Amino acid sequence: MLKSQGYAAQNASSPLAPFSFERREVGAHDVQLDILFCGVCHSDLHMARDEWKGTAFPVVPGHEIVGRVTKVGAHVTKFKVGQTVGVGCMVDSCQTCPSCGEGLEQYCENGFTGTYSAPDKVSGGYTYGGYANNIVVNEKFVLSVSDKLDPAGAAPLLCAGITTWSPLRHWKVGPGHKVGIVGLGGLGHMGVKLAHAMGAHVVLFTTSPDKREDALRLGADEVVVSKDAAQMAAHANSFDFILNTVAAQHNLDAFMVLLKREGTMTLVGLPEHPHPSPSVANFIFKRRHLAGSLIGGIQETQEMLDFCAEHGIHSDIEIIKIQDINQAYERMLKSDVKYRFVIDMASLAA
Ligand code: NAP
Ligand code: ZN
């Protein structure tokens, strides 16, 4: 077995702390990497605190992984030792169901294997994530990270990037569209950058008025403070598409009424407590849609990484030491992230 060092939560109320564990040795189709950087997603916090119920403890979170390949299995063709690669939210799926066949492994009908806290079909037990020094993953779930990308700034693309890219592409966002992004956190700031790069007119909705200048710098054309009813009313019936990244329960009606006839609001935020049920009338009278979206498939993740490399798009990050992860979680709960924490895994050795 391969020895690994990381940080884990032992139960829903304990802080993350150093943890030693084992991973499988590299199999014929596996890639082993030394993890250089791992982004800190709000999902890591939801999981470490068991807010979605069902976390397998101890949990080593982390699914925005960039590392360097140290070993490849005998049958690996896509990767070689020394290459910079990424691993996102999935490390396995059935590969036989219709969704996997269409490259939508995140909707695998037999259940994909999450990068952490998921039953490990290969070696038994549960998967451990990227707040660690190394990981072993089937090559099908490993992504190429271009040398044009900064490895630390690229790490959040593996979740925050693909989770916003996939719905923006699925709902065909582009020039001539008025697009709203709700929440300027890890996902939201990538949503602003990507929707802007796709050519849309981007409006950022925030509860934090002091994020206004940053939002404009990141690519928003307009900023609306969502608590200000007059600012909200000025945008009634005007959006083609709204991507809602908020990590806490809130009133969805306030955004539904901003959609045009047949517009769509897609939820990617998954709060601990459900949103109040939205008003049916807002759907009926304008044939509006409310939808959801989960991360993205492996092929589209590679397309997103290649697009970001070509367009020079990175996440705006604050690099932290692994020892500061618990404070980072507290700051994330206060919406005080500019705009993604990324753990420098070299700190693990300290
Ligand atoms: P984050 O960095 O904490 O950002 C969330 C943002 O939501 C905050 O920065 C804040 O932005 C806004 N917000 C927070 N509390 C709010 C409240 N009470 N009312 C209104 N707005 C509030 O989190 P993240 O990492 O981007 O993740 C966001 C959510 O997406 C989480 O629930 C996460 O689990 C989920 N997620 C889903 C997927 C998927 O596949 N669907 C993938 C990854 C993550 P402002 O300060 O601008 O208001
Ligand atoms: Zn995530």
Image: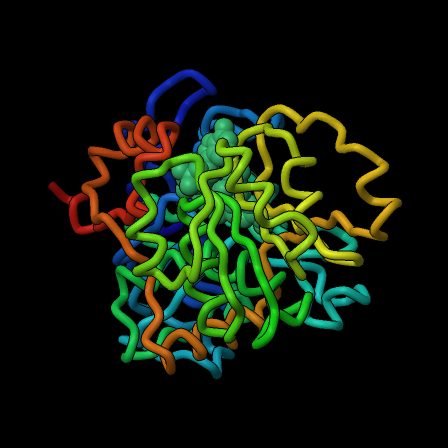
Residue at 53% in and 45% down = 245
Image quadrant assignment for residue 54:
top right
Residue 11 seen in render: yes
Q: Residue furthest top?
A: 13
Residue 29 seen in render: no
Q: Is residue 183 left or right of residue 105?
A: left
Q: How is the image coloured?
A: rainbow
Image quadrant assignment for residue 84:
bottom left
Nearest the eye: 257 or 270: 257
Q: Residue furthest left?
A: 350
Q: Is residue 234 placed above or below 49 in the rendered structure?
A: below
Residue 217 percent coordinates (x, y): 30, 60
Residue at 54% in and 30% down = 248
Nearest the eye: 189 or 341: 189
Nearest the eye: 86 or 219: 219
> How many numbered discs sit on the rendered protein?
0
Residue at 48% in and 83% down = 77
Residue at 73% in and 50% down = 291
Nearest the eye: 73 or 93: 93
Residue 346 percent coordinates (x, y): 17, 51
Q: Is residue 206 placed above or below 148 in the rendered structure?
A: above
Quadrant housing the C terminus: top left
Q: Is residue 29 left or right of residue 21?
A: right
Residue 99 percent coordinates (x, y): 76, 64
Residue 296 percent coordinates (x, y): 60, 61
